């Protein structure tokens, strides 16, 4: 085969693959834009003040809202964060600062396993260990289920960002006489602070959309849930219940709830990224 | 105190909230069938007594039975009465009995979506059983076209839609099929969840009606009110006296009245396919499941008061929502039975 | 993760500048390396403990069907709550099939996009699109289910005749199509997992040292040849790892699948037939399962799914570990 023919073929292949991969990207990005756009159109259109302030109304009566679900989701996420983030973060610290050897390997492996546990199984777990003995559904149970789901992601992201901190920082601190613990907590962690915060926000965002763990734990509530021992309404469960209903008003509310949830998740993501990007520039 | 600690305390306080001592939350779960009625009742009752909150979630009759047996809810609701094995399980788990209180009556109707057919179809028991058994597969089968002269039925495959979750609505439907079809009784049986020979599963009455609406050539079964809410065409069914009857408040009440004499003391009775020429055969009571012993005195009072109100004032609201109110004889019997709640 | 890509660390804040004003909590920690190590060790250990507890709970709460059915549970195709006869086969089948469809659709799309974003796209575009695609990963699954019911299923009804025309001769696309089906569930899953494949693969490809690319280009390779011959072999284990992780997510996905899979526990050859998955049946039937055998059979299904996830995660972990240690 002559050199120029071979070259032509190689160049053509180059072009084709470039185009093909570009097409893939366009498809993937296109799907996202479509999803966001659809949700925006349907969700924003039926968003009204009632949605944010009123309680659900009986079937057939208009004017209901999801105020209790919004607050309920907030409470659940708060509990989940209090459980999942400290445990996950500190475990991540262990893995990145102290962890070599079989124990650390075991922890990483099991963390991945826990990450792969389907949310429904997590829900059953929380149901069996909390709801059944207590004989009632509660916000606690839902929060704990979500919290356990947050742990693996917190571990992974903390470990990654802590590892990314240059060794020189650690060595510098120790050279100045700090104990290892002091070096970690006063130097390394603050240096990785933005990445860790990003990880936390992404974690919360992902878990805020989980429905299955809540079905058997926080149940749902027609009214305001008081304290943390009662069942509570939550946005994902409401979306799920309303979406398959035959009432048009409920459909509208499901879209609105979906839109609000998505906007919150996106908002958290955007803020997290901006904080990370901004602080990286500052550090340099 | 550090800034962070202050924020934490603020957040926790807001989350935990100020618990008001007066509000009483009573949780219930169960049937989707009477959900519109219950949500209306609980709402009205809450307006009368603002401190009483009845939180009812429609997770399916099976769910109601399961959760009330586990003790995670204060009362349950079901469209299919608990069988002896379930009663025993309840007794073993909770240490006391569970009482059935009929609340309203409703009906299951066959809904369908046949292209080109807007008229109301007549269904015989044999046709329904055959369709759901999978032995009748096309819309122009003689069993279906026979009772419907003058309606052009296409030669399309029938798509059966049933419930994917356990439900009393299913119970009523299969209970009826068991009574009219020996084949069904032996092959499938009755329960809130069965091994369907054919068909797609939809979640809740909502899922089934949605599925039927979206799928051409589909047939499913839903509660009467859901069919009406969705403006779906539903068929007439031939009753035991051989007459094709459309489900309505009158025909459902007739069905109950014709069985009323034989209602046992524990109210667990199936009234499908009763005699009488004006009965709609696929009718049923729906029940509240209330423990015979309630520890919490305030909850006990709240629940017993509600049941009394439901049997008197509440019944008046039933017809507006397309539920058939209970026959007077049954109401009288129930009012006496309330005393059984300790 | 990109923070320390430069091998020689730029000077970070000196310890005195970077140290936060110590509050009492930090002061206590500072005083002991052992305390710090102990506390963090405890947290790491708690993960092992929680997972063990989880498996233990699943195990003992599925005792009845395990003793009654044994390994036949995995082979039986009936799911009959009335007769008390339970088998996992249709659900295992549905779970594996929907996940397989998801992979078949998502992997080419995902890896292709990752390559484009990492190698060919201008950096600004690459970062912007990567950001957008990562956001897609954060969309809650309930919403995917909603979109599945309201958009995808009707759209597939329109597309189906063409699919039938092209592939109808295979048993895979035979039979009637009702909208809800294994195929619909697979498509929804593929959309849900593609962002994971793209974002992880893109990172992995970008991490391949530039020397590789420069060497290949210096030898006269085209852009594509560089990617295919010099870059991808290094990234392949990482990409495979991302695929395994995406698969693990697909296996456990509940909500979106329940809404579009048809919920019919039967094994049929056609992808256009309705099916059922483990996660979906647990979600549908768990709260209302009455009777010990029924409830425990559902829990045993959860155990089966967990076992599947263990196997797959194990493979992913080993591959990723090997890719980190392996080539470079």
Image (cartoon, coloured by chain):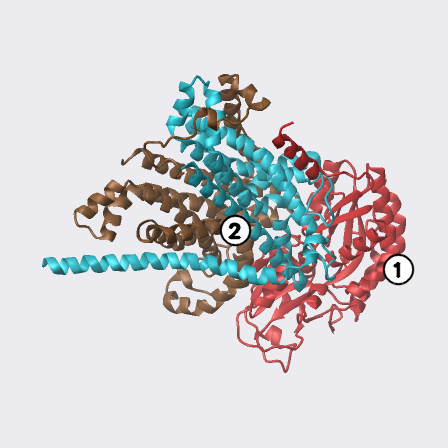
Q: Is residue C241 left or right of residue A6?
A: right
| Residue found at the far bottom of this picture | B150
Viewer can see residue C82: no
Question: On residue B328, which mark appears?
Answer: 1
> Residue A191's x, y, as percent?
46, 32
Dot 2 falls on a residue whose secondary structure is loop
Which residue: 44% across, 52% down? C133
Chain that appears red: B
Pointer 1: residues within 10 angstroms few (<14), some, or many (20+)? Answer: few
Residue topped by disc 2: C139
Which residue: 88% across, 51% down? B308
To which quarter of the image does residue B135 belong?
Answer: bottom right
Q: Quadrant of the C terminus of chain C?
A: top left
Q: Colour of chain C?
A: brown
Q: Chain of mark 1?
A: B
Q: Name the foreground residue: B144 vs C31.
A: C31
Determine the CA span between mark 1 and mark 2.
Answer: 53 Å
Q: Colour of chain A?
A: cyan
| Residue found at the far front of this picture | C17
């Amino acid at each position: 085969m002559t050199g120029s023919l071979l070259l032509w073929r190689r160049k053509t292949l180059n072009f084709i693959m470039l185009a093909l991969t570009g097409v893939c990207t366009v498809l993937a990005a296109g799907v996202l834009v479509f999803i966001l756009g659809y949700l925006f159109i349907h969700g924003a259109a039926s968003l009204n003040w009632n949605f944010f302030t009123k309680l659900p109304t009986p079937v057939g009566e208009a004017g209901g809202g999801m105020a209790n679900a919004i607050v309920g989701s907030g409470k659940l996420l708060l509990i989940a964060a209090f459980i999942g983030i400290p445990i996950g973060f500190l475990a991540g610290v262990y893995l990145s600062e102290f962890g070599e050897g079989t124990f650390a390997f075991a922890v990483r492996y099991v963390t991945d396993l826990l990450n792969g546990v389907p949310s429904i199984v997590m829900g059953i777990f929380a149901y069996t260990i909390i709801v059944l003995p207590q004989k009632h559904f509660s916000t606690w149970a839902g929060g704990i289920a979500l919290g356990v789901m947050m742990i693996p992601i917190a571990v992974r992201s903390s470990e990654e960002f802590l590892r990314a901190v240059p060794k020189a920082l650690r060595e510098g601190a120790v050279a100045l006489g700090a104990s290892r613990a002091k070096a970690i907590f006063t130097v390394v962690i603050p240096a990785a602070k933005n990445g860790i915060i990003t990880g936390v926000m992404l974690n919360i965002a992902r878990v805020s959309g989980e429905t299955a763990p809540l079905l058997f734990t926080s149940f749902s509530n027609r009214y305001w849930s008081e304290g943390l021992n009662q069942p509570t309404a939550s946005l994902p469960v409401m979306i799920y219940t309303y979406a398959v209903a035959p009432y048009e008003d409920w459909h509208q509310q499901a879209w609105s709830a979906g839109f609000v949830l998505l906007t919150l998740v996106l908002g958290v993501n955007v803020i997290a990224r901006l904080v990370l990007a901004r602080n990286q520039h500052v550090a340099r | 105190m550090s800034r962070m600690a202050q924020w934490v305390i603020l957040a926790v306080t807001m989350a935990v909230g100020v618990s008001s001592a007066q509000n009483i939350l009573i949780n219930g779960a169960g049937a989707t069938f009477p959900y519109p009625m219950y949500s209306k009742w609980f709402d009205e009752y809450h307006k009368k007594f603002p401190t009483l909150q009845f939180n009812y979630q429609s997770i399916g009759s099976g769910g109601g039975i399961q959760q009330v047996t586990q003790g995670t809810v204060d009362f349950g609701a079901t469209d299919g009465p608990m069988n002896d094995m379930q009663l025993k399980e309840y007794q073993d788990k909770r240490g006391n009995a569970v009482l059935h209180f009929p609340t309203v009556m409703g009906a299951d109707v066959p809904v369908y979506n046949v292209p080109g057919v807007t008229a109301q179809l007549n269904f015989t028991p044999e046709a329904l059983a055959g369709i759901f058994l999978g032995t009748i597969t096309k819309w122009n089968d003689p069993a279906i076209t026979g009772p419907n002269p003058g309606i052009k039925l296409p030669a399309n495959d029938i798509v059966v839609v049933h419930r994917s979750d356990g439900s009393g609505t299913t119970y009523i439907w299969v209970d009826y099929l068991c009574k009219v079809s020996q084949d069904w009784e032996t092959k499938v049986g009755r329960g809130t969840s069965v091994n369907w020979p054919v068909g797609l599963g939809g979640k809740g009455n909502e899922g089934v009606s949605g599925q039927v609406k979206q799928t051409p050539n589909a047939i499913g079964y839903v509660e009467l009110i859901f069919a009406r809410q969705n403006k779906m065409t539903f068929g007439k069914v031939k009753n035991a006296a051989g007459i094709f009857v459309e489900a309505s408040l009158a025909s459902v009440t007739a069905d109950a009245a014709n069985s009323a004499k034989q209602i046992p003391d524990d109210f667990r009775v199936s009234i499908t396919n009763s005699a009488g020429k004006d009965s709609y055969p696929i009718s049923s009571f729906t029940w509240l499941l209330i423990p015979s012993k309630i520890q919490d005195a305030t909850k006990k009072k709240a629940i017993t008061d509600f049941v009394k109100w439901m049997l008197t004032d509440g019944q008046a609201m039933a017809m507006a929502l397309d539920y058939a109110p209970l026959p007077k004889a049954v109401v009288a019997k129930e009012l006496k039975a309330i005393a059984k709640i300790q | 993760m990109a923070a320390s890509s430069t091998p020689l660390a730029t000077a970070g804040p000196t310890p005195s500048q970077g140290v936060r004003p110590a509050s009492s909590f930090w002061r206590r920690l500072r005083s002991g390396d052992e305390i710090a190590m102990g506390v963090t060790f405890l947290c790491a250990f708690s993960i092992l403990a929680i997972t063990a507890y989880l498996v233990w709970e699943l195990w003992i709460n599925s005792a009845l069907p395990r003793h009654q059915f044994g390994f036949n549970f995995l082979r039986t195709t009936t799911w009959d709550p009335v007769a008390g006869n339970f088998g996992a086969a249709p659900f295992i089948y549905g779970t594996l099939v929907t996940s397989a469809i998801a992979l078949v659709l998502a992997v080419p799309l995902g890896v292709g996009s990752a390559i484009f974003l990492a190698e060919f796209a201008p950096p600004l575009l690459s970062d912007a699109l990567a950001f957008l695609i990562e956001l897609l990963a954060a969309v809650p699954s309930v919403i995917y289910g909603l979109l599945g019911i309201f958009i995808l299923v009707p759209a597939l009804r329109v597309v189906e005749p063409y699919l039938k025309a092209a592939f109808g001769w295979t048993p895979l696309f035979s039979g009637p199509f009702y909208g809800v089906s294994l195929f619909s569930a697979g498509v929804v899953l593929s959309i849900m997992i593609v962002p994971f494949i793209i974002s992880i693969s893109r990172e992995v490809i970008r991490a391949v040292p530039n020397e590789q690319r420069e060497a290949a280009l210096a030898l006269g390779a085209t852009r594509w040849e560089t990617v295919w011959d010099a870059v991808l072999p290094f990234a392949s284990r990482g990409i495979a790892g991302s695929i395994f992780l995406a698969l693990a997510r697909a296996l456990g996905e509940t909500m979106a699948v329940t809404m579009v899979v048809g919920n019919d526990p039967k094994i049929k050859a056609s992808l256009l037939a309705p099916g059922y998955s483990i996660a979906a049946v647990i979600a549908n039937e768990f709260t209302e399962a009455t009777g010990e055998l029924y409830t425990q059979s559902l829990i045993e299904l959860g155990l089966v799914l967990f076992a599947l996830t263990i196997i797959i995660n194990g493979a992913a972990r080993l591959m990723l570990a090997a890719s980190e240690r392996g080539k470079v």
